[in-house]
Image: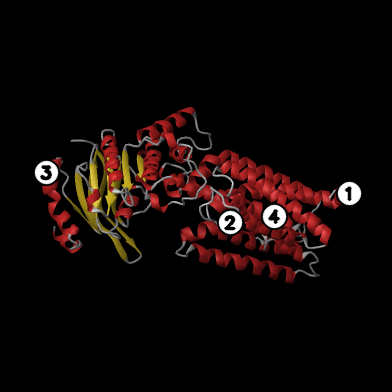
Amino acid sequence: MIEALEYGFMMDALAASLLAAIACGIIGVYVVVKRIVFISGGISHASFGGIGLGYFLGIEPVLCVIPFGIASALAIGEVSRRTRLSEDVAIGILWAMGMALGIMLIALTPGYAPDLLSYLFGNILMVSHSTLWVMLALDVIIVTVVCLLYKEFLAITFDEEFATVIGIPAHKLYLVLLCLIALTVVMLIRVVGVILVIALLTIPASVSRRFTNDMKKMMGLSIIFAALFAITGLYLSYLLDLPSGSTIVLVSGVVFLLTSLIPSGHNFKY
Amino acid sequence: MAEEVIGLRNVSVHYGDMPVLEDVSLSIYQHDFLGIIGPNGGGKTTLLKVILGLVKPDSGEVRVFGGDPLQNRRYIGYVPQYSLFDHSFPISVRDVVLTGRAGKALFKRYTDHDKKMARSALEVVGMLSLKERQIGRLSGGQQQRVFIARALAAEPKVLLLDEPAAGIDARVQTEFYELLGRLRQRMAIVMVSHDITAVSVHVSKIACLNRRLFYHDSKELLAEDLEAAYQCPVELIAHGIPHRVLREH
């Protein structure tokens, strides 16, 4: 591992893993306890449209994903409320439309897209310094918002209707939460890619849930798990010359399976 | 005459083409303990949601403390059906009750006063000793008490309970009604239930709801009068001849 760190790109990859772990550790807990895994999957896949748009306009794709992901998050959060469409249908449509749009825009862009696969499945070894700064800024935003809104988020994730009745703008805060998911997706795209994002939004939080019934502790633990998964996966991929994103996801999956075999007083059902 | 706490005038609600509530009028006054009974699917939960401003009626008027439900619903303590919760949710009893205070000051931490109110609410329902317990590790009756404490923590002037006795055994139910009886000194209580036995001697007024509301009038009923007043629907429901008979009532 030490030897691997002598490469600058490995140091950058390590930094990216840790920065991404902070975001997905915190936001993943909300995704899991509020049971919005499918919504999060929708946001991450729809975000691929932003990558396509970045290629098409010749802008850094990650920067394009931020507004695109937020727009998708707001669309998913609003569409089922304002129309007669059921929420899962709305998500399914946006999920596929975003992906299709991304592919279409890339096809329309002259030349070919050499690192297309890295956006789909992640390639943490390609993370640039400017991306690291963007990730740091997103972490600061996510942590700040969660600190400010912790009690409100807890109230709406536990019981949205009750929260509405006692005067919390529950729907608006729910949209804020979806936007934070979109920002987390942006961070995870570099690590595991849009298709595998959902693994890091669900597995660390689900594993940590087996060890605690306190949401704050769950967030802390899930940051640690996410970082461990990313670093272990990264190291294994370096050692065995495997794709980094899928190695990280498989490591997470294996740990999840192992911990679900341990009998635990805390688990009820997932 | 006591102040009207909640008033509904000719309220109708449809879900799509299906009428759920038709021409419902109702007045609830301070210190009332209104029991609303009716079959499953009779619109009981919808009625509560109309009062809370969570469901907008297609026609008719809803007044909560003389104003718009959206403005004044924060004075209502809502106790939804406890069985509908995610029992594995990582939250302690104390934190559940504290969420009752979460609307008092947005974007700020809970104050010492909030914590004091949550504590005294837990004391009232007799659940203070279990405050660190994860919510799913309580019995049904205990969870019900915690959800009442959460509503009380918000310092409500009226309590709305949705099927509070469902799934709670008879002995615990008795204790539970004693608790409601004590709370009635402080606030109006509205309780909906499909279970006629749930409507105990503690109730001061009774209504039957099956799309239409059959209100046993707004006049105060004494406990002795009560039995006579709702003898017939009690008997009829208990014998399984349902709501068609209620309508003629």
| Element marked by disc 1 | loop
Indicate which disc, 1 or 4, sits on the residue closer to the N terminus: 1
**Kind of residue at disc 4:** Leu
Q: Is residue A70 visible?
A: no
In the image, which is nearer the foreground, mark 1 or mark 2?
Answer: 1
| Element marked by disc 2 | helix
Q: Which residue in the structure is indicated by mark 4?
A: A188
In the image, which is nearer the foreground, mark 1 or mark 4?
Answer: 1
**Kind of residue at disc 3:** Asp
Residue at 58% from the left image edge and 38% from the top image edge: A148
| Element marked by disc 4 | helix
Q: x%, y% of residue A263?
A: 57, 52
Mark 4 is surrounded, within 10 Å at the Cα level, by few (under 14), some (14 to 19) or many (20 or more) other residues, namely many
Q: x%, y% of residue B119?
A: 42, 32
Nearer to the camera, B49 or B167: B167
In the image: residue B135, left or right of residue A146: left
Find residue A73 and name its label. 2
Find residue A6 and name its label. 1
- In the image, residue B116 sits, relative to residue B57, either above or below, namely above
Nearer to the camera, A5 or A97: A5
| Element marked by disc 3 | helix
Real-space Cα distance between discs 1 and 2? 39 Å
Chain where mark 4 sits? A
Real-space Cα distance between discs 2 and 3? 57 Å
Nearer to the camera, A136 or A249: A249
Nearer to the camera, A173 or B181: B181
Find residue B225 and name its label. 3
In the image, which is nearer the foreground, mark 2 or mark 4?
Answer: 4
